[in-house]
Amino acid sequence: MSRIPHRRLPALVLASCALATSALVVPSTSAGASPLGPSLSTVTAVAPSAQVSTARTAAQTAALAKAQAVLRTAASLKGRPYRYGASGPRAFDCSGYTKYVFSRNGIALPRTAQQQWRKARKIKKSQIRPGDLVFFGGAHKYHVAVYAGNGMIWHAPSSGKTVRKVKIWTSRWSAGRIIG
């Protein structure tokens, strides 16, 4: 068994502890040499955020899959008639449509556009992604739709019309996130 010189023991303990927690800070010395000695000067540490990043990526992947499922459900209802107060599956009003689409994918939403707005996490328009909700109106949200991407939404528009995908027609809208 070889002996470790006493002057290097604290550095080796520090290196072992740092590697166990996946972070290592190596202070510089006046001569530019590693305080850990030549045999440990090339130790590379792995950032502790790598594990968090992997978990975050898995969560983002799951959210993306859920959003895609929501959009498939939204598209599958194209052509269903609008009827005030209807929550599907044969006819919908706007919030009945979003409630139904999300519920078919295991996500419970309240009944009205205003209640759905209260439940959603408010996001900036620049952060919107497919599967988010688009709300119309000022303080009182009177219409809700599912964001389809590229400035398009799926919605149940109004009497005499059917569920369809359209371009957002106004700048007076807000975004809310339910998934992720």
Image: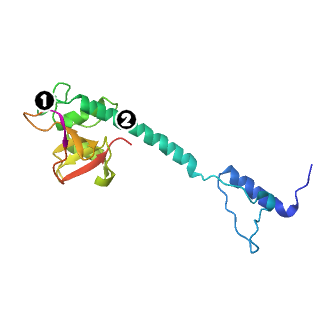
What residue range appears in magenta? 162-166
Residue under circle 2? 66
The answer to whether residue 115 shows anywhere in this view is no
Dominant secondary structure (helix, strand or loop) of the stretch shown in magenta: strand
- Residue 107 is situated, as x and y percent measured from the top left of the image, at 33, 34
60 displayed left or right of 167: right
Q: Residues within 10 Å of mark 1 (few under 14, many from 20)?
A: many
Magenta span includes 55:
no
Most extreme residue toward the bottom, as rendered?
Answer: 30
User: Which residue does the image show at 92% across and 48% down from the upper left?
Assistant: 1
Disc 2 on helix, strand or loop?
helix
Q: Which mark is residue 70?
A: none
User: Which quadrant would residue 61 be assigned to in this image?
Assistant: top left
Amino acid at dot 1: Pro
**Which of the marked residues, 2 or 1, is nearer the chain's N terminus?**
2
59 displayed left or right of 66: right
User: Which residue does the image show at 17% across and 37% down from the upper left?
Assistant: 94
State whether residue 44 is above or below residue 84. below
- Residue 60 is situated, as x and y percent measured from the top left of the image, at 43, 42
141 displayed left or right of 27: left
Amino acid at dot 2: Lys
- Residue 91 is situated, as x and y percent measured from the top left of the image, at 15, 28
- Residue 128 is situated, as x and y percent measured from the top left of the image, at 31, 49
Residue under circle 1? 81
**Closest to the observer: 16 or 43?**
43
**Closest to the observer: 177 or 85?**
177
